[in-house]
Amino acid sequence: MKTEVLSAAQPVLVAAAPYLIEQDYSAYTDEHHAVWAELVRRVLPELEKHAAQEYLDGFEIIGLQRDRLPKLVDVSARLAPRTGWNSTAVSGFLPAPAFFEMLAARRFPTTTWLRSRDSLEYTPQPDIFHDVFGHVPMHAHKVFADFLEHYGRVCASIEDAAVLERLGRLFWYTVEFGLIRQGSEIKVYGSGLISSHGECKNVIDGHCAIHDFSLDEVLQTSVKVDELHKLLFAVQSFDEIYDAMHEAERRAKRGTL
Ligand SMILES: [Fe+2]
């Protein structure tokens, strides 16, 4: 049972409750595991060179396997003692209140379906490869983990759609498509870069401008989902996104975000 890895202090989910499911691991076929293995094989050699060290460390910490789909209860059991995060199975796309409620409770909404061999590069909706391979390793990093919970908590308290849209940009340019400078190199940590060979290569091959992370510029940069990125943002350390979220919260409370 997935509840076994949750601490007694876990808040009860209300908005997200209708979307919670169990991962039926026995339903995955040999073909599913083979597709997972192929997806990993396509991107891991590149990531070993170009992913943030924190992502690669997280990959080992949560015990991802290269040739088998992950069991969410096992991933969560490894994460819980480190950061208290839990990878929680959901039925699909969540409305914003349910999504924010889960982040605020350190429960990452995780899809359990896997793309088919016909669409290795792209799926319009996130699947378990994007969610677990792309996102969950970073949840083992304490500062990132704190940032993500704080993001959910702040967004859950906001009703103004325009403010939420701007905060969505912060999520997009960090959690989904974030970059970090490590030594003299640019490394990827955003899940959309980690889980997409094409998006990652676009950055590595220099087809995308990279600006130093600035909360002001991120909040002013709209999100485009139908083309490869032409501009992304690199932090110097994960403390920057942690601090940016606190600044965003202050501005939201003042009505200046
Ligand atoms: Fe994502």
Image (cartoon, rainbow, N blue to C red):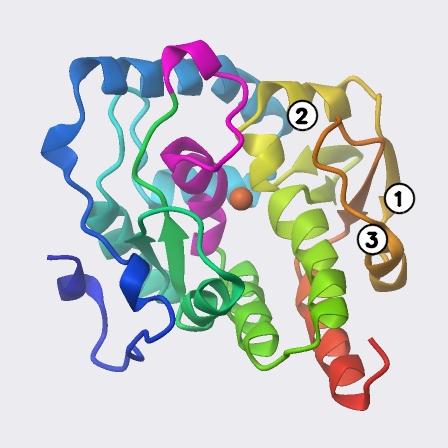
Residue 213: assigned label = 3
Q: Alpha-carbon neighbours of circle 1 within 10 Å: few (<14), some, or many (≥20)?
A: some
Count of residue discs: 3
Q: Residue at x 53, y 18 (%)?
A: 121
* Label 2, label 3: how far apart the Cα atoms are: 19 Å
Gap between marks 3 and 1, in whole Å?
6 Å
Residue 19 image point, x, y percent? 31, 58
Dominant secondary-structure state across the stretch colored magenta: helix
Which amino acid type corresponds to the residue marked 2 in the rendered image? Answer: Glu
**Residue neighbourhood size for the residue with mark 2, other residues' Cα within 10 Å, grouped as few (<14), some (14–19), many (≥20):** some
Point out the image quarter for the C terminus: bottom right
Check the image and report above or below for 220 versus 70.
Answer: below
Distance from Cα at disc 1 to Cα at disc 2: 17 Å
Asked whether the beta carbons under mark 3 and mark 1 sit within 8 Å of each other, the answer is: yes
Q: Mark 2 highlights which residue? A: 199
Q: Residues within 10 Å of mark 3 (few under 14, many from 20)?
A: many
Residue extent of the magenta highlight: 116-140
* Residue 220 visible, this orientation: yes
Question: For numbered disc 2, what is the local secondary structure?
Answer: helix
